[in-house]
Image (tube, rainbow, N blue to C red):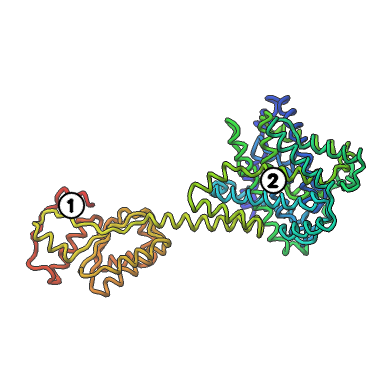
């Protein structure tokens, strides 16, 4: 027990901050401070909006951005990653809030944080590379659609209808709007979204989200637009850390949602860190350390009333584009937001909900990379199918199920493609030192097959079908030197084929079995079957000679053919 704990602690120590991090923060602090300030301006309306969308309120979004943003910056595995509440996480949290309430979300966040720390200790970060690009693009498209639809009630200025299915809620909101139109809210939402989208094309470096939100708030206050419902009162500061929300009796029922939140936090954070690496030169994140940082952030955020957090791709991209080079920028972003919480809560509380809806609508639109989607959709039919299935599942079900469906379909299609590479071809016997008459006589009774590629469960049964259809011969030679891989199913199918042929009086000879395949063949008894009959050989010429001797002994061939030393052609078959 002590040894296991020591090993786990040693793994954690390796992932903790070190002197190199501090040295990087001292390299160009001015640029990092400016980048952090810019990111904070961009992050403020997003944190407020995602907090409102999650169901826990704007204060929860701000608490998450401050606490999780600071801890993930210090302990995370990327120098440029910016963490906080995100749209993808909001998509997962909405049904959890509806079913378990705010305390359930906080408990789920804490549990997910512990799971992420466990994944970091187990060095699970490297497995992110196995998620196919169409799955990532598909759930990104699905998330964008869900985020956009979630904003419809606030954008229309109607109370959020009951329900946790976004399509149902959107439809009910549209029906309510038709009964009691609120064109003021619609105008604010559309105006904010338009300013953000058009402004980003005109001046990409200017944070038009905060400009649009300030303008919308000012107009709403000066014009006394009662139809523009504000966020509401915000606390002037972060709440005192507390575990009062934790209900130990409900941990079992919250396990599945916690697994979903942890999986999403890991996936989105590692994806965001990879994007940051791709936007820079010389930066390389540590995936296991990133999981540790996100785990600690998600353990701490619920203690302050925050929702689960992940690495935020949009904020991370802004951080990189504005010249950040170290963790100091992300720390500055968290510090500026904390200052806003303490000093400007009354002003922030006046922001209209419709304005935040406009921010998130624009964010959802900007999440859709048309070029990437087009590339995936036109690459192969398999990629297009995976993308569409993942996106539809995200919209109709939820994100975790969508990723699982995408991975399962991608895996099945990949296996299908690999299975098609397996070939089972009849090859002519080498003439060797035989005359034309002798060779023709041998060819009438012996057939040789060469197996190329993998012999595993996805391709094995096709092999069995083709092999057992062999007719009008007395001996079969299986040339197996080109079998790239074999599993238990492939070995069992091979054994079954040999037994069926032998029951028909056809002798089976095998040659070129690789050392790595002997164990699996031996485990199912296929190798012993061949050895018992004395029909397993190192090279093809030996197998041909043994088959010829067998046919002579059985009286199938007339007087023994002349045996001569191997020719160069026979040696080439080995």
Q: Position of residue 464 (x, y in %)?
A: 34, 66
Looking at the rendering, in which quadrant would you find the N terminus?
Answer: bottom right
Q: Residue at x 73, y 41 (%)?
A: 71
Q: Position of residue 246 (x, y in %)?
A: 80, 57
Q: Residue at x 72, y 52 (%)?
A: 149
Mark 1 or mark 2, which is nearer the start of the sequence?
A: 2
Which of the labelled discs sits on residue 256, or is there none?
none
The residue mark sitting in front, 2 or 1, is: 2
Determine the secondary structure under disc 1: helix
Residue 257 lies in quadrant: bottom right
Q: Residue at x 72, y 57 (%)?
A: 166
Determine the secondary structure under disc 2: helix
- Residue 136 horizontal side relative to residue 460, left or right: right
Q: CA distance from mark 2 to mark 1?
A: 67 Å
- View extreme (bottom): residue: 503
Q: Position of residue 380 (x, y in %)?
A: 48, 50
Residue 27 lies in quadrant: top right
Residue 94 lies in quadrant: bottom right
Residue linked to disc 2: 364
Q: Is residue 102 visible?
A: no
Question: How busy is the neighbourhood of tag 1: few (under 14 within 10 Å), some, or many (20 plus)?
Answer: some
Residue linked to disc 1: 570
- Residue 292 horizontal side relative to residue 541, left or right: right
């Amino acid at each position: 027990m002590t040894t296991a704990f020591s090993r786990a602690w040693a793994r954690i120590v390796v992932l903790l901050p070190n002197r190199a991090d501090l040295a990087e923060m001292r390299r160009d602090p001015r640029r990092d401070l400016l980048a952090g300030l810019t990111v904070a301006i961009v992050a403020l309306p997003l944190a407020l909006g995602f907090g409102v969308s999650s169901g826990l309120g704007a204060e929860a979004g701000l608490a998450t951005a401050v606490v999780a943003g600071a801890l993930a910056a210090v302990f995370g595995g990327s120098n440029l990653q910016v963490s906080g509440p995100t749209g993808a996480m909001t998509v997962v949290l909405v049904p959890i809030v509806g079913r378990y309430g705010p305390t359930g979300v906080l408990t789920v966040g804490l549990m997910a944080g512990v799971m992420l720390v466990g994944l970091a200790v187990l060095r699970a970060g490297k497995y992110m590379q196995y998620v196919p690009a169409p799955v990532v693009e598909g759930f990104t498209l699905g998330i964008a659609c869900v985020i956009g639809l979630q904003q419809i009630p606030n954008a229309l200025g109607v109370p959020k209808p009951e329900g946790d299915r976004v399509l149902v809620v959107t439809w009910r909101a549209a029906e309510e709007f038709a009964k009691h139109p609120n064109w003021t809210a619609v105008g604010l939402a559309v105006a904010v979204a338009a300013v953000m989208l058009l402004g980003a094309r005109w001046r990409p470096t200017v944070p038009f989200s905060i400009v649009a939100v300030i303008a919308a708030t000012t107009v709403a206050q000066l014009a006394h637009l009662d139809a523009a419902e504000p966020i509401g009162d915000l606390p002037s500061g972060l709440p005192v850390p507390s575990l009062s929300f934790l209900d130990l009796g409900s941990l079992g029922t919250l396990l599945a949602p916690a697994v979903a939140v942890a999986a999403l936090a890991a996936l989105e954070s590692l994806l965001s860190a990879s994007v940051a690496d791709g936007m820079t030169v010389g930066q390389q994140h540590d995936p296991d350390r990133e999981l540790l940082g996100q785990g600690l952030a998600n353990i701490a955020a619920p203690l302050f009333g925050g929702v689960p957090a992940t690495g935020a791709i949009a904020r991370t991209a802004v951080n990189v584009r504005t010249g950040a080079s170290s963790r100091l920028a992300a720390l500055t972003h968290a510090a500026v937001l904390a200052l806003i919480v303490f000093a400007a809560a009354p002003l922030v509380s006046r922001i209209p909900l419709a304005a935040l809806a406009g921010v998130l609508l624009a964010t959802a639109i900007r999440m859709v990379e048309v070029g990437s989607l087009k590339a995936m959709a036109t690459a192969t039919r398999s990629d297009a199918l995976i993308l569409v299935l993942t996106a539809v599942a995200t919209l109709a079900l939820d994100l975790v199920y969508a990723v699982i469906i995408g991975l399962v379909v991608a895996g099945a299609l990949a296996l299908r493609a690999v299975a098609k590479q397996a070939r089972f071809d009849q090859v002519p016997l080498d003439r060797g030192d035989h005359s034309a008459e002798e060779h023709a006589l041998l060819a009438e009774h012996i057939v040789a097959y060469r197996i190329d590629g993998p012999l595993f469960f996805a391709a094995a049964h096709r092999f069995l079908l083709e092999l057992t259809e062999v007719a009008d011969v007395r001996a079969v030679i299986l040339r197996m030197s080109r079998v790239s891989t074999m599993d238990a199913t492939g070995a069992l199918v091979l054994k079954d084929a040999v037994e069926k042929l032998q029951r028909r009086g056809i002798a089976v000879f095998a040659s070129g079995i690789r050392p790595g395949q002997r164990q699996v063949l031996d485990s199912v008894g296929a190798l012993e079957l061949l050895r018992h009959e004395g029909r397993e050989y190192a090279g093809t010429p030996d197998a041909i000679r043994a088959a010829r001797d067998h046919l002579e002994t059985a009286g199938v061939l007339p007087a023994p053919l002349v045996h001569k030393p191997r020719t160069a052609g026979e040696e080439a078959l080995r």
